[in-house]
Amino acid sequence: MSVLQIILLIFLIVCAVSVSLTHDLLNAILIYMSFSLIMSIIWVTLQSPDLAITEAAVGAGVTSVLFFVTLKKIHAINIEEGTRELNDKDINTEDIDGLNEPEKKQM
């Protein structure tokens, strides 16, 4: 096992742990894409180019595009404005008890 493969495996472990710990969905997808790309480089170093091409095309390509489309459909990202904010209609804080302080009645 070469030094390059060991470094790639360390990066692979870091990506796997960080995608599990992140709370931002867009960051999780980007980390997943880098996981796939690192995995495809590992396949190349193991002299398996067919698996590397498949991993790059399916893992970093098609799957990531499907994740982005899903985030757009659930309104987790707004591509037109380039933001990752939820729309105002998605969250209604008036319906949640305990967030708003009760109004004090004047006597």
Image (tube, rainbow, N blue to C red):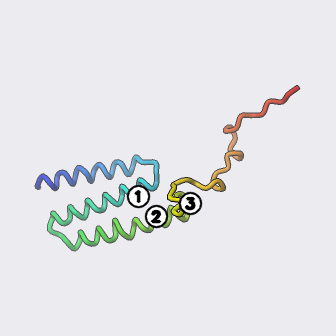
Q: Which residue is under mark 1? A: 29
User: Furthest residue to the front?
Assistant: 81
Given the image, on which type of amino acid does mark 3 rest? His
User: Is residue 87 toward the left or the right of residue 102 in the image?
Assistant: left
Q: CA distance from mark 2 to mark 3?
A: 11 Å
Image marks 3 and 1: residues in contact by CB distance under 8 Å? no
What residue lies at 64% left-to-right and 51% top-to-bottom?
A: 91
User: Furthest residue to the bottom?
Assistant: 50
Q: Which residue is under mark 2? A: 68
Given the image, on which type of amino acid does mark 1 rest? Ile
Residue 14 is situated, as x and y percent measured from the top left of the image, at: 29, 48
Residue 73 is situated, as x and y percent measured from the top left of the image, at: 55, 65
User: Is residue 47 toward the left or the right of residue 106 in the image?
Assistant: left
Image marks 2 and 3: residues in contact by CB distance under 8 Å? no
What residue lies at 45% left-to-right and 56% top-to-bottom?
A: 26
Residue 38 is situated, as x and y percent measured from the top left of the image, at: 26, 59
- SS label for mark 3: loop
Query: Is tag 1's residue or tag 2's residue first in the polypeptide sequence?
Result: 1
In front of the other: 17 or 91: 91
Query: Is tag 3's residue or tag 1's residue first in the polypeptide sequence?
Result: 1
Q: CA distance from mark 3 to mark 1?
A: 15 Å
In which image quadrant can residue 49 be found?
A: bottom left
- SS label for mark 1: helix
- SS label for mark 2: helix
User: Furthest residue to the right?
Assistant: 107
Given the image, on which type of amino acid does mark 2 rest? Phe
- Mark sitting on residue 75: 3
